[in-house]
Image (cartoon, coloured by chain):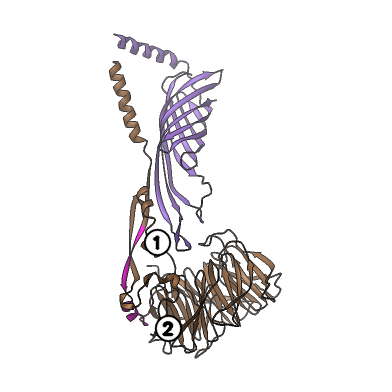
Amino acid sequence: MNRLLFALSLLIAFVFQGCLKDSCRNTYTIYRPIYKKLSQVRDDMHSVAPKQLVATGKIYVYGNYIFLNELNTGIHIIDNTNPSSPRNMAFIPIPGNVDIAVKDNYLYADSYSDIVVFNISNPTDIKPAKFLNNVIKENGYFWGTLTKPDSVMILSGYTQKDTTVDCETYNQWRNCITCGIFFSASDVYLTATPSSSSSGGTGKAGSMARFGIVNNYLYGVSYMNLYSVDITIPSNPQLAGTTVVSGGIETMYPFKDKLFIGSTSGMFIYDLSNPVHPSSLGQFSHVRSCDPVITDGQFAYVTLRSGTACQGFTNELDVLDVTNPSNPSFLKKYDMSNPHGLSKDGDLLFICDGKDGLKVYDAKKKDDIKLIRKLDGMEAYDVITTGHTAIVVAKDGLYEFDYSNKADIHQISKISISNS
Amino acid sequence: MKRIYLLNLLIAVYTCAEAQVSPKASFQSINQVGVLEGEAGSAFQLQTINGIRYKTYSAGIGVGLDYYFERAVPVFIDLRKNILAKQNSPFVYLEGGIPFTWTKSKDDIKEPEYHHQLMYEAGIGYNLPIGKNARFLMSAGYNYRSFTEYSYPTYWIYAYPVQKKQRFDYELRRISIKMGLEF
């Protein structure tokens, strides 16, 4: 009897032991990269039939055209002759593309560490005019020590597969560099000075851009360097100089003879008297955050937001007095929900406040800006104002709003992203 | 022979005890503390269950705190049955409900989301009368809890932190030991 009880106790303990096991399963998507020869990829870099919007990136306006980045994939060309009915007319496949700038019918696009120049005189037949190899070296891991495009293999796409593994197994895979790289956006962006022309001159970029054209120079920032590219001959750009700026650089906004650079730790103002090697003029520090910045010459407007790769917990608009660019000073802050890009036209200040939509402020009094219109129903990312139309790129597509009458700001068109 | 005697004794005790159970339904409150023991270690738990008792049956709604692995506030239905129809008696119980995860702050930039939260527990215990209307009770059982967590862990790509939504499905299996008071 005692042996039976003892054996029963052991059996119960054994069974119970098995029943006490905790489990953790991790479900995620594995991305396997597809590599192609760079020369082969470049052969495909020309305009093709229009594609659906899927993952909208930055916007750029040049004359009657909107160039909309499809993140890491290429550029949509949209005929905006009639803003009430914009037409998606073509697509240029450019692996690794994030930023755009245009001058005199030449479009400059990043492709990982390269800069590609396209002749856009005929928007329906766009072809590359020149390739600048390995300019933004922060993204130069494809080139390494190679010098010929035929030798370089670049990431041109990926396959994806959902899988479930034990959590312990997954932790060993978290160091997969090739998988991780594809989660990130390219570091290189292009911006343009705020003037537009349909047949020449430069176009206009959004505040989230990192490229800029000032006179005969194209400037681009990576997370720590400022690159100066001589585009005196637009079809034949040449890397002219590299300036170490700071860590955590995110956006750049050219204004006249200065560059306003947004970083995770503050705003920097650079002087372009020496266009090859811009010099630091002044800075304004803020809490750690992602911060696009624009300026009207007297005041700078900086949005800080939380929930980003930059970390930080602040959501606000800072207005700075930059009358003396050597010593920018804080004027006032305004609480926001989750502000992203912004644009200013006269006294109207447009702020993309994330899921809170597009907010339009009367900014005549800088220390007392007034909200005059709130447009909901979209997760707004960036905005460009053109004098009467605000072009907004949002998570679900491209919007246009007529603000010619500021008492009646309303949506006039939308190109939606694909749901497939 | 000893077994037959023991069986007869149990039957006699049960028959006598039957006459001592109140026939009316009455309010019942059970308040307990205890531990949860499993692969992730030992953790504190506490709960309060309020409901009704009728003869040897009771049912109630409970709420508690579960500190095992991921803190949670379980809200559940509790069903009990006294084996013997008297004040001091062994009992069996069954609980089932939703353990609402109550997260502590994490390093991720975005707060995790929790879905498909489920718990159940089954066990046995014993009541001991204290005074006129109270009872001390202790119990041991098997507790199962499952939930799905969507989180946004940070990965570093070069100098940039990147988040990617991840799904984790957890199943926690524990021994639950509790003691407390019943009114």
The residue pinned by badge 1 equals A180
Question: A322 above or below A182?
Answer: below
Q: Residue at x 37, y 71 (%)?
A: A142
Chain letter for the brown part:
A
Lateral position of residue A32 relative to residue B30, left or right: left
**Tag 2's secondary structure?**
strand
Q: Residue furthest front?
A: A145
- Give A303 or B98, whichever is nearer the viewer: A303
Secondary structure category for the residue under label 1: helix
Q: At 41% from the left edge and 84% from the top edge, which residue is drawn?
A: A118
The boundaries of the magenta stretch are A29-51
Count residues near mark 2 (Cα–Cα under 10 Å), then give few for <14, some for 14-19, many for 20+: many
Along the horizontal axis of the image, is A98 left or right of A204? left
Q: Which chain is purple?
A: B
> Mark 2 is on which residue type?
Val
Residue A66: x, y in percent?
Answer: 48, 81
Residue A322: % across, % down = 67, 74
- The CA span between labels 2 and 1 is 29 Å
Point out residue A288 in the picture as x, y percentages from the top left corner.
58, 61
Question: Would you identify the image quadrant in which residue A329 lies?
Answer: bottom right
Q: Amino acid at mark 1?
A: Gly
- Asked if residue A16 can be seen in this view, the reply is yes
| Residue A83 showing in the rendered view | no
Q: How many marks?
A: 2
- Which label sits on residue A349? none
Q: Which mark is residue A117?
A: 2
Q: Is residue A49 above or below residue A283?
A: below
The chain ID associated with circle 2 is A
Q: Quadrant of residue A88?
A: bottom left
